[in-house]
Image: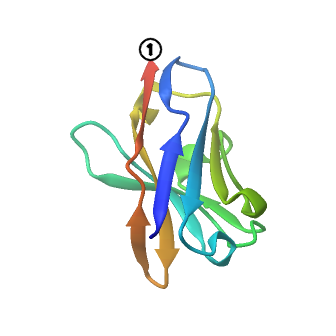
Amino acid sequence: QVQLVESGGGLVESGGSLRLSCAASGFTFGSYWMNWVRQAPGKGLEWVSRIYSSGGITYYVDSAKGRFTISRENAKNTLYLQMNSLKPEDTAVYYCVREYGTTFDYWGQGTQVTVSS
């Protein structure tokens, strides 16, 4: 079955960096667009970034541009999100999400990122 398992979250000071990973299994990882979506405390879901199946095309929410980098290693079935210059407003649970057509059909369990001021 499809599984997405995030890791790499934690507590970091403002201005710091974290790299999130998402280990995928149960499907042909290299055939799908993948996304990172986050949910801040008490708020709704916010899409963060998207990457083409082969990795050559990426998109970001405006607040992440210039600070976050999405990447993938299809040979390792792994998705990444490098987050630099972190701000307290980046505090959220970050989810790895598979995209299928116009839907986000599989979600990981999420990893908590907390940025202290």
Query: In the image, is residue 106 above or below residue 15?
Result: below
Residue placed furthest toward the bottom: 101
Residue at left offset 41%, top offset 32%: 91
Q: Residue 74: x and y, percent?
A: 73, 63
Query: Please, what is the three-letter code of the amino acid marked with disc 1?
Result: Ser
In the image, what residue occupies the spot 78% across and 68% down? 56
Q: Residue 101 at what x, y percent from top left?
A: 49, 85
Q: How crowded is mark 1: few (under 14 residues within 10 Å), some or many (20 or more)?
A: few
Is 38 rendered above or below residue 52? above
Q: Where the C terminus falls, by quadrant?
A: top left
Q: In what element is the residue under mark 1?
A: loop
Q: Mark 1 points at which residue?
A: 117
In this view, 86 is above or below 31: above
Q: Quadrant of residue 29?
A: bottom right
Residue at 50% from the left image edge and 68% from the top image edge: 98
The residue located at (21%, 39%) in the rendering is 42
